[in-house]
Image: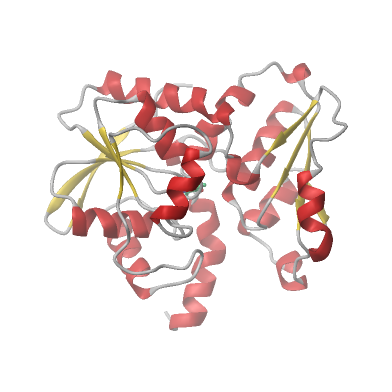
Amino acid sequence: MINSPISKISLGKREFLVKRDDLIDPYLAGNKYRKLYSLLNAPSNALNKIISYGGTQSNAMLAIAAMCKRKNWEFVYYTKPVSLSLKEQEGGNYFHSLSLGMRHVEIQEELYRDFISSLRLNLDERTFVIDQGGADKSARDGLEALASEIREANLDCKSLATPSGTGTTALYLALALPEYKVYTTPCVGNGEYLREQMSALCEIPQNLIIIEPDKKWHFAKPYPEFFDVYSKLKEEGIEFDLLYAPAMWLSLINHTKEKILYIHSGGVSGNESMLKRYKRKFNL
Ligand SMILES: *Cc1c(COP(=O)(O)O)cnc(C)c1O
């Protein structure tokens, strides 16, 4: 794998750099590629099955499905019951994950919690469980690889930014690059919730800066402000995801001034279904 390239992009009157992790692969890209890096580099015969769970439009789900296809591993994904309209949808992360061979199992709402907490009981040694969103200590290796690429690029900029769900990406990136400021913003819950999630993995370093959003964004809800910044960036030549990136860009515009390298976190494959929702909601 060669290093992902770095592009320039203007937004407003500012110029940003973007680490193009979105270009790594159509399905296995962005921070999910980085988080799965050590599994991707494991010998294929070390495992024969991956188990994971979470949302049915998740980018992690799609990345794991692409990895399992490549490694010839079985992939079982557990969710709460899903709607018929999702099952019938052509396109989107769920559709593509099934096409890549994912086996989807629905667990009744009442049983879901207990079922998930018992996933690691009685596993054989060739089965590996990945927690929701890939929040795992094994993600550290891949983010150290990303950190080396950033160091090698020798840029005239000492600040990075990437949006957070579980915070795994931003946390390990900040740990691997103590000489950089790493900005992030919570896209699921608020800053306090993000800090809690990060603290479960390890101590939060000084150089990691969590920008509290100016408005309370609910995860995966369509907002005109999100579509606006998404469209501006797309016009400038780079497509970003509609769930995480817009909140990060809005935080950067409002709360930073210096030159920043934005780490593209991927997720563009999920836009297919999000754009349909935007069109319906705002008559675009
Ligand atoms: C998963 C994801 C994130 C969040 O990554 P965390 O490591 O969970 O904080 C951000 N952006 C995109 C596009 C994602 O798919």
Q: Is residue 257 left or right of residue 284?
A: left
**Viewer-side residue, 81 vs 9:** 81
Total numbered circles: 0
Which coloring applies here?
A: secondary structure
Q: Is residue 278 above or below residue 42?
A: below
**Viewer-side residue, 221 vs 178:** 178
Q: Is residue 210 above or below residue 20?
A: below
Residue 126, x across and y down, in percent: 81, 23
Residue 119, x across and y down, in percent: 80, 41
Q: Is residue 161 left or right of residue 4?
A: left
Residue at 69 percent of width and 56 percent of height: 95
Q: Quadrant of the C terminus?
A: bottom left
Q: Give the quarter of the image for residue 177.
A: top left
Q: Residue furthest bottom?
A: 283
Q: Give the quarter of the image for residue 214.
A: bottom left
Let me know if residue 183 appears in the view: yes
Q: Is residue 280 above or below residue 38?
A: below
**Viewer-side residue, 184 vs 6:** 184
Q: Is residue 216 left or right of residue 28?
A: left
Residue at 51 percent of width and 45 percent of height: 197
Residue at 47 percent of width and 54 percent of height: 193
Let me know if residue 21 appears in the view: no
